[in-house]
Image: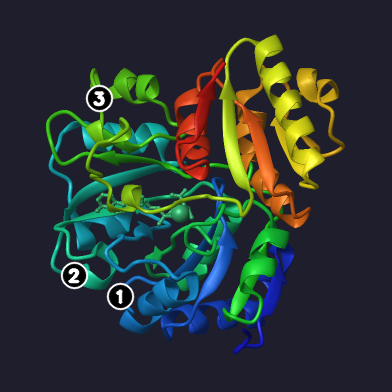
Amino acid sequence: MTDTDTRIYKEKDLDRPSVQKDIKDTIQSGRNIIFPTETVYGIGAYALSEEGVWNIYRIKGRPSDNPLIMHIGDTDMLDDYVHVDQPYVKTLMETFWPGPLTLVMRRKDSVPDTITGGLDTVGVRLPSHPVALKVLSIADVPICAPSANISGEPSSTLFEHVYKDFNGLVDIIVDGGKSDVGIESTVLDVTQATPVILRPGVITRSMIESVTGHADMSSALEEDKVPQAPGMKYKHYAPSGELTIVDGEDDRVVKYINDKIKVHQASGKTVGVIATEDLVKTFDTPYVYNIGPRDDDAEIASNLYTALRHMDQLGITHIYSVAFRESKYQEAIMNRLLKAANNNLIKV
Ligand code: TXA
Ligand code: MG
């Protein structure tokens, strides 16, 4: 499906007045632009444009009761859109903005229902990626931007990912190379005296607690609970192949996966494995994705969606991933991986 001639810009193009005019006009007239952030690429629209926001839901195939994050380039904008109720919120902003932290605050009437799914709160984030900040500054308005992926599929951390999914469907794509963090922002509800983590990210619970003293994890982050962040209830990040996470001692994990490889290969299936560097040579399939050194959780996070997309590109039908349990980002990484696997985790 293509219905638009997508204009592709590189970071250096953003200094050209004609490109700046194009970006500003495109956003302000309710059209869509894909741009990199430090977490993942986002598909953006002017937050107050009903048309632009509906287009996001339409293009992504996203359920419209799943609210969008509003990106701002400057904290001066906050007062127009939200109530900052709790005293610790300002310190959180000073400590972690710009950066991968989304703060869910009580919204003002200026924030349209189209982006909040009818909730009386809105998530706001000031990203740190220079290209995102440049786009926000050129647009001079708040930009709603969910992750730029077809709803339910893995998010995008490379230009190639968004080009494949959205060329011909949006007006502009800005190529900013790799999104370094690789998984989406931490979503934190800051409407109450104790903040609640609705989605884990690389701004971890202990980092937040260093500012607020205490933070709760949403009970919805436990299995079998009713979702609180509306996005939690939908299928997420899933590759086309069937993904299984295998969790346990290394030698048992390797043996389990190699046994499965034998079984699947006997029936003509292709099997892929996602593993840390130290293990990649231990599997009996050519399709092993090296996600990074075991102790480099930042690297593992940054390669997670590429790994899942890589398996799809190869047409792999059965994907096995090791579990990642030894890092400070494990909460965030395992949250995404478990969703991608539809909670299909085998303990060995
Ligand atoms: O890193 C990110 O946050 C990326 C980049 C592009 O900024 N954006 C992103 O957006 O991940 P999205 O739409 O894919 O995820 C937003 C998450 C969803 O789980 C949504 O349900 C939750 O934030 N959310 C948004 N507004 C909320 C609100 N008012 N209350 C509770 N959850 C909210
Ligand atoms: Mg998303």
Q: Secondary structure at mark 2?
A: loop
Give the x, y percent position of residue 4: 61, 88
Residue type, mark 1 in image: Leu
The reply to whether the C-beta atoms of the residues labelled 2 and 1 are less than 8 Å apart is: yes
Q: Earlier in the sequence, mark 1 or mark 3?
A: 1
Give the x, y percent position of residue 138: 51, 70
Residue pointed to by mark 1: 48
Q: Is mark 3 within 8 Å of ligand 1?
A: no
Residue pointed to by mark 3: 215
Side of 187 where 266 appears, left or right: right
Q: Residue at x 63, y 68 (%)?
A: 165
Which quadrant: the C terminus?
top right
Give the x, y percent position of residue 317: 69, 49
Residue pointed to by mark 2: 110
Residue type, mark 3 in image: Ala
Q: Which mark is residue 74?
A: none
